[in-house]
């Protein structure tokens, strides 16, 4: 069965090590679109951070952001799907981080909030192309439920934080690594696989006609959902094991290679 929809993660997948989309990759995506294939982005990033790449690629389709908590049309900016965290649970998580002194940042209404800016915040701002707002202790009592929250810590500390959050909140949260120093927290029903299922239903596309490409644990659900899951050469072992194929690394045009091999006619 031919591929009609390609869903691609951004960081360490579509983007090279300079957080750019290579010429070869842009050309492969454009050729796929010209052949009638729908290409979209599925990322943990916030919508304002993902949108410039979607527009650069001239994607006139809904894109998946916040790990699937939000699906929004690129051009009209019409929101097709939105599932924020449960407010009470989010406040409990934030209180835990306040008590432990752990770093966490929160996304509310497409705005990134932090208690105060530090080196982690500034590195994230530069990588994501966004500006965070410092709000002090108001961070721990948001006015409405956050779309998602992100923990940034060294890998060893992040393992401890992840296990603590999982043991305390269990199935009330979606928790997954997107990088070795990033831990994503969202509503328990949110993941990229479910978002992709919603999108395929909207587009009347069979899951067997979907190719998903990713590298991290937060990509695992969409790799498993897609009829053809492709792991990046730089991807996590669990993603490679779940995928039907492994392509080149992100700095070797791995997405372009996968599109050229499995999608283009």
Image: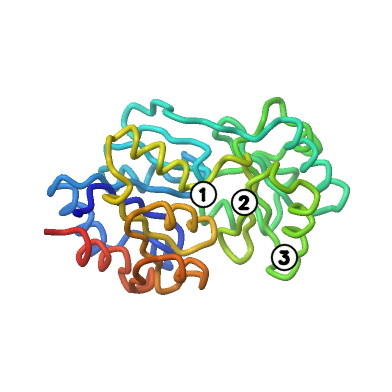
Q: Residue at x 41, y 36 (%)?
A: 198
Calculate the distance from the C-alpha at mark 2 to the C-alpha at mark 1: 8 Å
Distance Cα–Cα, label 3 vs label 2? 13 Å
Q: Which residue is mark 2?
A: 184
Drawn side of residue 37 relative to residue 47, left or right = left
Quadrant location of the C terminus in the rendered image: bottom left
- Which numbered circle lies on residue 44? 1
> Relative to the observer, which residue lies in front, 117 or 114?
114
Q: N-terminal of the two: label 2 or label 1?
A: 1
- The kind of secondary structure element at disc 2 is strand
The crowding category of the residue bearing disc 3, from other C-alpha atoms within 10 Å (few below 14, some 14 to 19, many at least 20), is: some
Q: Nearer the viewer, residue 104 or 116?
A: 104
- Residue 53: x and y in percent read 36, 48
Which residue in the protein does label 3 denote? 159
Measuring from the top left, give residue 94's x and y in whole percent.
78, 42
| Among the two numbered marks 1 and 3 on one chain, the one whose residue lies closer to the N terminus | 1
Of 229 and 234, nearer the camera is 229
């Amino acid at each position: 069965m031919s591929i009609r929809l390609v869903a691609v993660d951004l960081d360490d997948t579509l983007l090279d090590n300079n957080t750019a989309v290579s010429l070869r990759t842009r050309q492969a995506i454009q050729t796929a679109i010209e052949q009638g294939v729908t290409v979209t982005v599925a990322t943990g990033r916030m919508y304002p951070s993902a949108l410039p790449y979607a527009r650069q690629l001239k994607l006139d389709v809904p894109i998946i952001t916040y790990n699937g908590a939000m699906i929004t049309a690129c051009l009209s900016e019409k929101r097709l799907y939105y599932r924020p965290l449960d407010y009470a649970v989010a406040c409990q998580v934030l209180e835990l981080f306040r008590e432990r002194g752990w770093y966490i940042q929160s996304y509310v209404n497409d705005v990134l909030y932090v208690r105060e800016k530090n080196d982690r915040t500034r590195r994230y701002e530069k990588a994501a192309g966004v500006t965070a707002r410092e709000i002090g202790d108001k961070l721990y009592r948001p006015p409405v439920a956050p779309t998602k929250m992100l923990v940034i810590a060294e890998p060893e500390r992040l393992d401890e934080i992840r296990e603590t959050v999982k043991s305390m909140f269990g199935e009330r949260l979606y928790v997954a690594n997107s990088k070795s120093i990033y831990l994503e927290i969202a509503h328990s029903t949110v993941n990229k696989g479910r978002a992709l299922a919603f999108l395929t239903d909207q587009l009347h596309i069979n899951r067997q006609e979907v190719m998903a490409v990713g590298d991290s644990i937060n990509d695992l659900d969409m790799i498993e959902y897609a009829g053809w899951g492709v792991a990046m050469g730089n991807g996590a072992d669990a993603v490679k094991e779940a995928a039907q194929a492994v392509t080149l690394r992100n700095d070797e045009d791995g997405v372009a290679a996968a599109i050229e091999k499995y999608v283009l006619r």
